[in-house]
């Protein structure tokens, strides 16, 4: 994995020192809260419902065991013993104190980490496929591009006060495991000449109030033109993106209002005649970075097939994925145990994963956009030992990709912008769905089901638009109401879900979701996924099932 | 009025030649022949002036470029690195934000960048250049 | 900046302490962690005074995000859902180091 050199180290240390100094000026009043707010946000520090929250970047989702231990240390010494992994490959600490944040940043810098641009109207943490570098279907490892973009965008002088936040995702396989088309800019890397990739550049995707699937900006862009094109795309957005209404300020609205053709023309006009010497070192830099990601010299194991019964069998089927090297496996660790808070992990659990990674996975961990963790390179022969250790820690839930693998944002239990809670909804659903999955599996049937995502407000951090079943918490006359959308997809067939009908109370949601799944079961063709069935059936059959008879809520 | 230059000098002046003033949100479409241009930023969080500075340098504007408006010391490096020569600071802002904060603005901000842009007057050399241009 | 949010009614002044970020309530002469200490403004004049206090306390860099919370005149519970949740805290036990059920 990527290791900081002296330059990177000095860079994050300088940023931490700069923030310490800014906090000092805030406390003496030289910076007003209005001035300090964009500065603290650019460093991931929010004022949430109950306290300050610090959001730390996990660039492209890659963590070393040592870095995970640093996170555990922060959780235990500067927070209340736990952290929350988000849908953007970040981790959030919910109970930090402003006075401690400079020290936390110093500790992070020592571990080669930072909170740079995890918030604010700037280029955010670049995200990717959590299986990057190990997935069997991968054509180009997207991590080198991500690191190149991390460096280019960090402390970028011109694009630090954009109309709104800006999210970039990169993938290098046909399967999209990073919801690439729901980003402001999405890149699909393909193999190109001389070991340098070529890219399809997508623009204008996003969730929030106006969900949009990205459009193709330009196909097959050679590596040399990637940064010049992104530079011009950002500049046109910076100059022309709307600043009068924050709900219309994302690039998706600019592209929709200008039209893709006109936007493209502006971008090419900006590129015209530019001196590209600032990007002259991009190719050698890419090669330097790529060398860090050279596949571990994994001793080739024999290609063994592991199977098992009971919980181990389920875990193998759901949580273990093929590795590109025979004899190895990719192990997902579910943070979605029955009744758990999606994405939350205690310091103790973080340490335990760090130890397991060190022992069995080359000291490397991944964080997924579905709020789980991954041990990317485990020898097939070690799977049973890893499973045993996870059972011990209560982290062996075999539900990756099943419906109980729910995404949920923090919602009104933590978030200052929320209109309703999302975590208790996820907890209740997880109880109900997990029981169903175990029962169905015991009956020897297929336990797979729709993806299920929950957001606590229209900002859609819980990606509800992109789920087969999306749940959006709203405030109706000062009580919580939950709206359901169906048919959304985050994968290569990206689609925005459709609203089913009037909202429900929190208590009704488990029954409603169960009815939707039962209706699907009843109409499902052999081997069909929920998204496929929905595309074939449309929403009426689900609507009838859900609204025709009132839902009985147990007292 | 105070002026911070790209060497970190921060001085009070009775009169400053601000040349032609243009709003940060509208970069000129043709190369201006003024010797001095002042780009007025619309607000603290409005970064359009940085791109306007960049566009002017791209067009080949080689005169003096001044950033004005409600900027904080923390944005000084953004201005220099986007091609500005100086930042104009009103008296009341200099007083509230602190003369020292302005004088030390460059010292306290992240000085080095990975990529140094065309026309940058910032302190950086560019880490990529340092890594590869031996 | 302090502002009156939502409906009118008996109000209390809340904010977050600048250094710790903790939720605090104005007791009349200081900030308290306990809502029980909060002074109530019953009429427009008193509400304006509280709003001004919030602004002054922000300007003195002791707190951030000061605003008035409107209570139900009968039950004394905040009228707004958001404020009820802010007052009650997270609605589940926080994760702790005992492992979850598998
Ligand atoms: S979706 Fe809304 S409630 Fe959930 S984290 Fe984002 S802003 Fe907060």
Image (cartoon, rainbow, N blue to C red):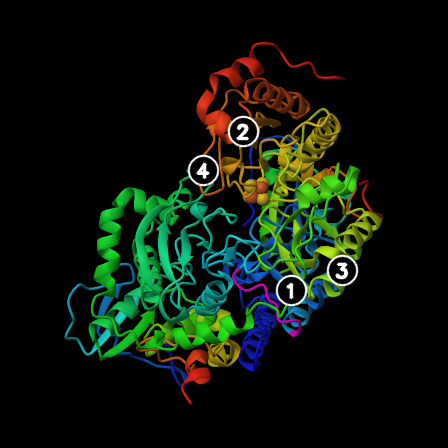
Disc 1 target residue: A300
The circle drawn on residue A387 is: none
Magenta segment: A110-117
Disc 2 target residue: A530
Disc 4 target residue: A209
On screen, residue B40 versus residue A440, left or right, reads left
- Between the C-alphas of marks 3 and 2, the distance is 34 Å
Q: Position of residue C8 (x, y in %)?
A: 58, 31
* SS at circle 3: helix
- Between the C-alphas of marks 1 and 2, the distance is 37 Å
Disc 3 target residue: A356
Q: Chain of mark 4?
A: A
Ligand 1 falls in quadrant:
top right
Residue at position x 36%, y 54% in the image: A201
Q: Locate the N terminus of chain A and report the quarter of the image it occupies.
A: bottom right
Tag in front: 4 or 1: 1
On screen, residue C35 versus residue A465, left or right, reads right
- Between the C-alphas of marks 4 and 2, the distance is 25 Å
- Between the C-alphas of marks 4 and 3, the distance is 41 Å
Q: Residue A15 magenta-drawn?
A: no
3 and 2 marks in contact (CB < 8 Å): no
Residue at position x 76%, y 60% in the image: A356
- Between the C-alphas of marks 4 and 1, the distance is 49 Å
- The crowd level at tag 2 (other Cα within 10 Å; few <14, some 14-19, many 20+) is many
Give a yes or no on whether discs 1 and 3 share a subunit. yes
């Amino acid at each position: 994995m990527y290791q900081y050199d002296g330059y990177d180290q000095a860079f994050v240390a300088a940023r931490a020192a700069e923030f310490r100094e800014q906090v000092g000026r805030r406390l003496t009043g030289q910076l007003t809260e209005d001035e300090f707010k964009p500065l603290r946000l650019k460093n991931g520090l929010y004022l949430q419902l109950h306290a300050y929250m610090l959001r730390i970047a996990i660039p492209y989702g890659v963590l070393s065991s040592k870095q995970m231990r640093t996170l555990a240390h922060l959780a235990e010494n500067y927070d209340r013993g736990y952290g929350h992994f988000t849908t953007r490959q970040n981790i959030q600490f919910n109970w930090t104190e402003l006075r401690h944040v400079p020290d936390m940043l110093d500790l992070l810098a020592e571990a080669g980490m930072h909170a740079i641009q995890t918030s604010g109207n700037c280029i955010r943490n670049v995200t990717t496929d959590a299986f990057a570098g190990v997935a069997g279907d991968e054509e180009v490892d997207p991590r080198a591009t991500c690191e190149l973009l991390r460096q280019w965008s960090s402390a970028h002088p011109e694009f630090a006060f954009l109309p709104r936040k800006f999210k970039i995702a990169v993938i290098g396989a046909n399967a999209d495991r990073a919801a690439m088309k729901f980003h402001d800019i999405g890149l699909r890397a393909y193999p190109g000449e001389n070991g340098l990739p070529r890219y399809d550049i997508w623009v204008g995707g996003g969730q929030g109030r106006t969900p949009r699937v990205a459009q193709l900006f330009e196909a097959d862009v050679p590596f040399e033109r990637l940064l010049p094109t992104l530079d011009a795309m950002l500049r046109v957005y910076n100059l022309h993106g709307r600043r009068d209404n924050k709900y219309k300020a994302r690039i998706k609205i600019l592209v929709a209002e200008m039209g893709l053709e006109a936007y493209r023309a502006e971008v090419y006009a900006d590129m015209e005649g530019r001196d590209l010497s600032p990007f002259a070192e991009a190719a050698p830099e890419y090669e330097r970075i790529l060398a860090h990601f050279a596949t571990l010299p994994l001793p080739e194991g024999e290609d063994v097939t592991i199977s098992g019964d009971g919980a181990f069998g389920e875990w193998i089927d759901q949580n273990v994925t093929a590795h590109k090297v025979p004899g190895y496996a990719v192990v997902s660790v579910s943070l979605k145990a029955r009744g758990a808070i999606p994405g939350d992990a205690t310091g103790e659990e973080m340490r335990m994963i760090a130890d397991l990674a060190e022992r069995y996975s080359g000291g490397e961990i991944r964080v997924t956009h579905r709020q789980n963790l991954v041990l990317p390179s485990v020898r097939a022969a070690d799977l049973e030992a890893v499973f045993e250790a996870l059972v011990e820690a209560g982290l062996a839930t075999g539900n990756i990709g099943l419906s109980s693998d729910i995404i949920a944002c923090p919602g009104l239990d933590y978030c200052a912008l929320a209109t309703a809670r999302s975590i208790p909804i996820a907890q209740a659903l997880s109880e109900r769905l997990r029981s169903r999955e175990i029962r169905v599996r015991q009956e020897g049937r297929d336990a797979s089901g729709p993806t299920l995502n929950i957001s606590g407000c229209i900002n859609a951090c819980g990606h509800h638009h992109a789920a087969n079943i999306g749940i959006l918490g709203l405030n109706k006359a000062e009580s919580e109401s939950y709206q359901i959308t169906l048919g959304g997809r985050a994968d290569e067939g990206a689609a925005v879900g459709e609203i089913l009908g009037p909202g429900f109370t929190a208590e009704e949601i488990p029954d409603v979701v169960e009815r939707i799944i039962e209706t699907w079961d009843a109409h499902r063709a052999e081997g069909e996924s929920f998204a496929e069935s929905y595309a074939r059936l449309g929403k009426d059959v689900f609507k009838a099932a859900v609204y025709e008879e009132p839902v009985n809520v147990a007292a | 009025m105070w002026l911070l230059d790209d060497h970190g000098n921060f001085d009070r002046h009775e009169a400053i030649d601000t040349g032609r003033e243009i709003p940060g949100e509208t970069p000129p479409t043709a190369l201006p022949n003024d010797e001095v241009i002042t780009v007025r930023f619309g607000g603290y969080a409005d970064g359009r002036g940085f791109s306007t500075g960049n566009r002017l340098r791209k067009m080949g504007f080689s005169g003096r470029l001044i950033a004005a408006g409600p900027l904080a010391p923390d944005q000084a490096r953004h201005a220099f690195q986007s091609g500005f020569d100086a930042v104009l600071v009103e008296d009341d802002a200099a007083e509230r934000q602190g003369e020292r904060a302005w004088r030390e603005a460059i010292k306290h901000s992240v000085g080095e960048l990975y990529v140094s842009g065309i026309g940058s007057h910032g302190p950086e050399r560019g880490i990529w250049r340092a890594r590869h241009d031996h | 900046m302090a502002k009156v949010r939502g409906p009118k009614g008996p109000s209390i002044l809340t904010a977050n302490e600048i250094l710790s970020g903790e939720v605090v309530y104005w007791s009349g002469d200081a900030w308290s962690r306990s809502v029980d200490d909060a002074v109530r403004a019953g009429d427009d004049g008193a509400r304006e005074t509280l709003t001004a206090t919030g602004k002054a306390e922000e300007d003195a860099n002791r707190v951030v995000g000061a605003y008035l919370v409107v209570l139900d005149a009968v039950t004394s519970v905040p009228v707004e859902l958001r404020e009820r949740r802010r007052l009650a805290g997270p609605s589940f036990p926080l994760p702790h180091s005992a492992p979850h059920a598998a």
